[in-house]
């Protein structure tokens, strides 16, 4: 039985896959609001232990008996239809007991009722932009509730039940669950075909963003990135249907899409070794205000994300000057150009290791371009070395040529075998469909099938002072510290 109504009883909530980044966040908010929370996961983890410390009762492994962890059956069961199979014993028991089963997005929609809903959607950048908005709003003296897909470096958490009027969250399009929400401020960072295993066609994928735009409340705003032509086109279509639309982006992009009123225009940006200085024109006030802030996370994509966060916060009634102070304080999110350490001495002294979640060609390009800009600004001849793990066979096959092109931006690339996640291996397909296409005139390339050998291979390619990136949505994050330790060995 599945329900998506607004009369869900949240007094006792059981979450299947409670340790996941999305599930653990809503579980934390439920606990803060006084709900009895139970759950299960296939493995122990830091999020699981943290939730247990807050009072959640959690079982490792899935079993029908887990529904009685609190001594009585839950009033609702929460699952991810994409990640949890229908024959999961807890789902089967819920059906037998006539307990409502809902998606995480349905639960989040319930939790946001009564708040000013600020939602960030888009193929790329949701977590970073949502996180920027949260930090900036906090700096502005607000205490927003939030649920994001990554852990804020400053707050050390991925969710919070705040006392303020705003609720800030990511709106995930991968299974069309973003259509569950009723945003007062809806941001679309970009639109590029992805998750075609779910949507089937590019047109169906684009359509879900049009439908999301139509979910904006009567007095609300749709905010679109004018540097992304598909997001801008979505904004124009929504505007024609009567939705209030504001744009953000570079001066050139705002000139190119004059049909959409620019709320924030990026007028200048300067990359230094320490930060990126950004100047914007905020046009939602009269007269327009020129604001400058320092971004600690590199990359043009992060500059655009910061403009989106600023505009969304101002539309949620935050004070602009305090918002830009918050943007300057933003130190990032786990696995988004996350600094993992520097080799102090020895033959690889000065080499820095970063970790990033990028797993789509556009994301890989953005991160490697940011890394290149950083080392170029330092001006000491440092190189960019990436250890990349493709995620999903379907995505790797679909974008093999694009991955090869973007990885050619690095000076050296170690490409691991494909992390299949939920997909079964495809016979005859491995990461060599990428490495065989990388431009070896610009990039030294290694295909490494053995995961644990990667740190040794990376060391063979690194010079002192280089910037090393582990990159991908799978287990490659585990190698960051291993690579750092390996480089530090004398």
Image: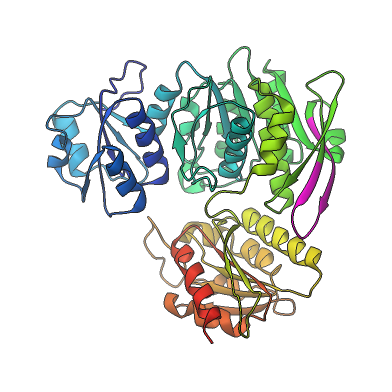
Identified at 16% across, 38% down, the residue is 69
Q: Nearer the viewer, residue 141 or 135?
A: 141
Residue 146: image location, x then y, percent:
49, 32
Quadrant in the picture for the C terminus? bottom right
Quadrant in the picture for the N terminus? top left
Q: Nearer the viewer, residue 198 or 317?
A: 317
State the image quarter where residue 320 is shown.
Answer: top right
Identified at 47% across, 27% down, the residue is 162
Q: Is residue 255 left or right of residue 120?
A: right
The correct choice, above or below, for 406 with respect to 466 in the image is: above
Residue 274: image location, x then y, percent:
74, 57
State the image quarter where residue 45 is shown.
Answer: bottom left
Residue 481: within the magenta?
no
Identified at 61% across, 80% down, the residue is 345
State the image quarter where residue 307 is shown.
Answer: top right
Residue 51: image location, x then y, percent:
32, 42
Q: Is residue 393 left or right of residue 212?
A: left
Q: Main secondary structure of the magenta part?
A: strand
Question: Which residues are the magenta region?
Answer: 264-278
Colour basis: rainbow
Q: Nearer the viewer, residue 297 or 343?
A: 343
Residue that extends furthest to the top in the rendered view of this protein: 218
The correct choice, above or below, for 2 with respect to 38 in the image is: above
Residue 192: image location, x then y, percent:
63, 45
């Amino acid at each position: 039985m599945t329900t998506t109504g607004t009369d869900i009883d949240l007094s006792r909530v059981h979450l299947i896959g409670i340790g996941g980044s999305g599930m653990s966040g809503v579980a934390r908010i439920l606990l803060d609001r006084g709900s009895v929370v139970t759950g299960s996961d296939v493995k122990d983890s830091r999020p699981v232990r943290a939730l247990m410390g807050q009072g959640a009762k959690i079982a490792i492994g899935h079993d029908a008996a887990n529904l009685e962890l609190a001594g009585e059956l839950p009033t609702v069961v929460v699952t991810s239809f994409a990640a949890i199979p229908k024959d999961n014993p807890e789902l089967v028991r819920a059906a037998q007991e006539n307990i409502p089963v809902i998606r995480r997005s349905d639960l989040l929609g319930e939790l946001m009722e009564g708040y000013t809903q600020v939602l960030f959607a888009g193929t790329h950048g949701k977590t970073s932009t949502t996180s920027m908005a949260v930090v900036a709003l906090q700096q502005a003296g607000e205490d927003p509730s939030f649920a994001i897909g990554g852990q804020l470096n400053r707050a050390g958490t991925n969710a919070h039940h705040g006392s303020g009027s705003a609720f800030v969250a990511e709106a995930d399009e991968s299974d069309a669950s973003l259509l569950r929400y009723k945003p007062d401020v809806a941001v679309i960072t970009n639109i590029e075909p992805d998750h075609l295993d779910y949507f089937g066609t590019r047109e169906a994928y684009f359509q879900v963003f049009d439908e999301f735009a139509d979910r904006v409340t009567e007095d609300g705003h749709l905010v679109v990135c004018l540097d992304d032509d598909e997001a801008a086109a979505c904004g124009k279509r929504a505007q024609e249907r009567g939705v209030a639309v504001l744009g953000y982006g570079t001066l050139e992009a705002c000139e190119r899409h004059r049909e959409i009123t620019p709320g924030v225009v990026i007028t200048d940006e300067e990359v230094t070794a320490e930060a990126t200085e950004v100047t914007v024109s905020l046009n939602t006030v009269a007269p327009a205000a020129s604001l400058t802030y320092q971004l600690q996370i590199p990359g043009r994509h992060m500059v655009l994300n910061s403009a989106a966060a600023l505009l969304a916060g101002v539309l949620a009634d935050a004070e602009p000057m305090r918002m830009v102070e918050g943007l300057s304080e933003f130190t990032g999110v786990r696995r988004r150009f996350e600094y993992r350490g520097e080799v102090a001495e020895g033959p690889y002294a000065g080499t820095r290791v970063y970790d990033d979640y990028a797993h789509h060609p556009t994301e890989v390009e953005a991160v490697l371009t940011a890394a290149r800009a950083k080392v170029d600004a330092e001006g000491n001849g440092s190189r960019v070395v990436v250890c990349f793990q493709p995620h999903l066979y379907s995505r790797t096959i679909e974008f093999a040529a694009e991955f090869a092109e973007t990885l050619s931006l690095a000076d050296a690339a170690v490409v691991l075998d494909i992390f299949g996640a939920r997909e079964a291996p495809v016979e005859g397909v491995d990461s060599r469909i990428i490495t065989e296409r990388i431009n070896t005139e610009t990039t030294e390339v290694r295909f490494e099938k053995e995961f644990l050998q990667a740190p040794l291979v990376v060391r063979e390619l690194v010079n002192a002072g280089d910037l090393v990136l582990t990159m991908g949505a799978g287990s490659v994050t585990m190698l960051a510290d291993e690579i750092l330790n390996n480089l530090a060995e004398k």
